[in-house]
Image: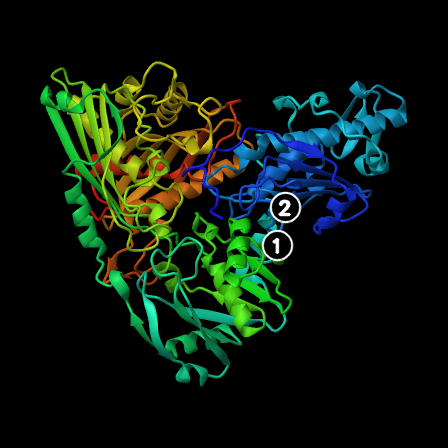
Amino acid sequence: MMPKFPFLKTKSPEDKSKVFVPSRRDFLKIGSLATGGFLLGVNFQCSGPKGETITFAPNVYLSIDSDNQVTIIAHRSEMGTGIRTSLPMIVADELGADWSKVKIVQAEGDEEKYGDQNTDGSYSVRMFYEPMRKAGATARHMLIAAAAQKWGVDATDCQTANGEVVSASGKKIKFGDLVESVREMQMPEPESITLRDFAEYKLIGKDVAIYDAKDMSTGKAVYGADVDLPNMQIAVIKRSPVIGAKVVSYNDEKALAIPGVNRVVKIDGSGIPPGLDKALEGVAVIADNTWSALKGRDALEIEWDLGPNQDYSSARQLEEMIKSTSGNGMVRRERGNFNAARQASGQIIERTYLAPFYAHGTMEPPAAIADFKGDGTCEVWAPTQHPQWARQAVGQALGIDYQNVKMNVTLLGGGFGRKSKPDFVVEAALLSRAAKSPVRVQWTREDDLHHDFYHAQSAQRIRAVLDKNGNLSGWNHHTVFPAIGATGNADELHPSDGELGLGCIDFPYEVPNIRIETHESKAHTRIGWLRSVSNIHHSFAINCMLDEVAEAKGADPVDFLMGMLAEDKNLTFEGELKGDFGNYGEPLDKFPWNTRRLRGVIERVAKEANWKEAVAAGKSIGFAVHKSFLTYVACIVEVERGNNGQILIPEVHYAVDCGIGVNSDRIRSQFEGGAQFATSLVLTSAITFEKGKVQQNNFDGYEVIRMPQSPKKIHVHLVESMEKPTGVGEPPVPPFIPALCNAIYKLTGERVYQLPYKG
C-alpha cells in the first residue's frame, strides 16, 4: 500500500462522517477503553490497504463512564504539534466536557479500528474538524435528552457545561449519572443534531496547553527509544553507504568477540529503487546493550559492491541541473505567449536560484521496537507518523498478514515527514524474527544524516519580462529537482504535478504571459518529503525574484504584489495547466485559491510590522508572501549584523489566515518553531554527496542554528476567519525563507541566489 499524500496526488473525500454506537462485537475489538460506559464512534470515509471500504473504521472514539470520566481516543501521531490535544478538544468543547477531567488515550495503528491515521501533510484538523464536532454534538444531544426525560422538562431548556447537563431552572446532573439512560437510547437522526455557535466555545479558538506538556517536561513521556521490554536486545546496523550498494561479503569474528554482542545478521535491501518503505542493505549487530552493539558494528569487516551511484557528486549534478535550465523543458503551465512578450520587452531580469539537499534532523533519531512471536504475529512500538503504512510494511517484510501486526504508537521527538516512512520499523521486525526476541533498532545521529529521505536539491531559472512601460508582462520559470516518486520508481525524472502544485504552477499573479517548465533529473539517493516539501525552493525563488522585479520598477515590494493580484476572486488555472492541480488533496470548490485572503495577510503583516516606517540604523527588513497547505501567510523579517558579522534576526512578523484556528497556542507555536527551522535552511544547513556518500556526520557538519542566530521576537498575527480550518505545521517555512533573503539583501547589498547563505 502506498500512503495517502494529499499534497502529491490524492483528493480527500467529502465529509460523509457517521456517528454511531459500536455493536457488542465492535466493542470487543477496542482494547483502549474501559468497559461499562457509553461509547460513540465516528466513521469518516475510510478505506483499507487496497482501497476497499472498511465497514468498521471509526476514526475516533468518545467514551463516557459512570464515574464521569470522559475518554477520547487520539488517532493521530503526536510529534510536538499538539494534534492529540487539538482534535480531542474539538470533541470535548462541542460536548461540554470539563477539559481538566478529559483523558486522552493514544490509538494503536489499526485502520479497521481507527481509519486514516496518517499524520502528514498538515491536514489533520481540516479533515476532522467537522466529524469531531458531530461526535461531541451527538453525545451532547443524547445526554440532554436523558436529563430532560429524568427531570420532565423540555430538552430545549437544557444545555451542557463542565461535564454536566444544566437546566434553565438551574438543575444539574453529571454526565456519569446519565450513562445508563443514554446506553438504552436510540441514536438521534443526523439531521436533528445542531452544532454550537462558534461564540459558545470555551476551548476552540483559545489557547489550550498541549496535553502532554507536563510529561514531556518532566521526563515521563514515552518516546520510541524509551520502550523497554523483558529480554529485549539492542541492534544497530551498518547500512549501505551508497544507495544501491550490496554486501559482497562480511567478517563478523571481531564483532562477535566483543562482550555483550549476541549475533550478526545481514539485511537484504531492495537495491535501486530503494523504495519508501523498505530497509536498506546492511549488516546488523544485535547485543545486550547499545554500547556493545555500537562497538560490534565498528568491528565489522564488510566488502561492498557500491553499485552505479558510487561516483555520484551532488555538486556535479547541480551544475548539470543549472545547465539544463538554459534549454527548453517540459511545459507544465502556459498562459499567453511568453516568447512574444520577451521579444517586445523593455527589460529582462534572469536569475538562477539554488537550494541544497536537506535532512530532517529530528531531535529524536529513528528507533523502533519489534517483538516477533513464534505464532506468526508481531507487536511493534514506534514513533511513526503513519501507523497503517508501518503495519503493512512490516507484514509484507515478514511475509505475514498485516492484521497479525500490532502497531503501538509512541510520542515522536520531531517528525517533519521523516517518520512517516517505515523503513526503520521494518528493520526492527526483521531483526526480531532473526533474534527470536524483542529487538530495538537504534539509529545514531550519524545514521540519521547518512541514510535519510532527503529534501531534493534544486535549480530554478526565472526570466521576468518587463514591457516598455515597466510592467511585468512575462514570467518563465524553469524548475529542476529529483522527484520524490523516483524513490519508488527510478524512471521518474520529472517532478510530479503534485510537487509542482506546491507553490510553482499555482503562481497567482496577474501576468499576461506565463510559461513554467521542468527538466529531467535523476535521483541518486532516497528523496522524501520534508516540512513544506517543494514549497521550500519554489517560494524562495519566486519571492526573491518578485522582490528584485519590484526594485527594478522602483516600486515598494508590498505595493507591487498588491497591485499584481487580481481583483478578489477564486483562481482555477483552468486551461493553462498541462496536468492536474492537486490543491493539497481538496476540491477547489471546497477550498478555493482566493486572492482576497492573500491580499488580507499582506495588508495585515505590513500594518503590524510598520512596513512603511523607517527602519533603525543598522537594520533592514524583508517581505514575502506564500500560500501553502491551503493557508495564506505573509512574513516580514528584520535583520542586523552581530559583532562577529553573523546575520542576526531581532524580530519577525507573520500574518496567518488558516481559517478557523482551533488552538491558537499551538498555531503560534508552529510558526515560532517554523521560523527557527527555516532560519537553519537559509543560514546553515546543507547535505552534500561525494562518491555517492553523504559528507556530513553530525550537527557539526549539518549545522542547525545556535541560540545567537535564532529569531528573538516572533509575532504571529492570526486573521479572524470562519472559513474551514487549514494546515499550520508547514506554512510557516515557505514565506520566511525569501523574507529573510530579501532582508539580507537590503542589509548587505548582496542578493541571495544560493542556499545556505554564507555571506
Q: Dot 2: what SS? A: helix
Visible residue check, residue 203: no
Does residue 141 appear left or right of residue 125 in this picture?
right
Which of the two residues, 535 or 574, is positioned nearer the viewer here? 574
Comes first in the chain, label 2 or label 1 = 2
Spatial separation of the CA atoms under disc 2 and disc 1? 9 Å
Give the answer, above or below, for where 519 lies relative to 94. Answer: below
Q: Residue at x 35, y 71 (%)?
A: 247
Which of the two residues, 735 or 131, is positioned nearer the viewer here? 131
Tell me whether circle 2 and circle 1 mark residues in contact (CB < 8 Å). yes
In the image, residue 669 lies at what x, y percent? 48, 40
User: Which amino acid type is marked by label 1?
Assistant: Gln
Q: Residue at x 48, y 64 (%)?
A: 427
Q: Counting other residues with Cα less than 10 Å from the Cα at mark 2, is it few (<14), some (14-19), or many (20 or more)? A: many
Res 16 → quadrant: top right
In the image, residue 120 lies at what x, y percent? 48, 43
Q: Residue at x 53, y 38 (%)?
A: 124
Q: Counting other residues with Cα less than 10 Å from the Cα at mark 1, is it few (<14), some (14-19), or many (20 or more)? A: some
Res 178 → quadrant: top right
Does residue 568 appear left or right of residue 165 in this picture?
left
Mark linked to residue 209:
none
Q: Dot 1: what SS? A: helix
In the image, residue 466 lies at what x, y percent? 15, 22
Visible residue check, residue 583: yes
Q: Residue at x 73, y 48 (%)?
A: 33
Does residue 665 appear left or right of residue 709 in this picture?
right
Mark linked to residue 112:
2
Mark linked to residue 403:
1
User: Which amino acid type is marked by label 2?
Assistant: Glu
Give the answer, above or below, for where 42 lies relative to 416. Answer: above
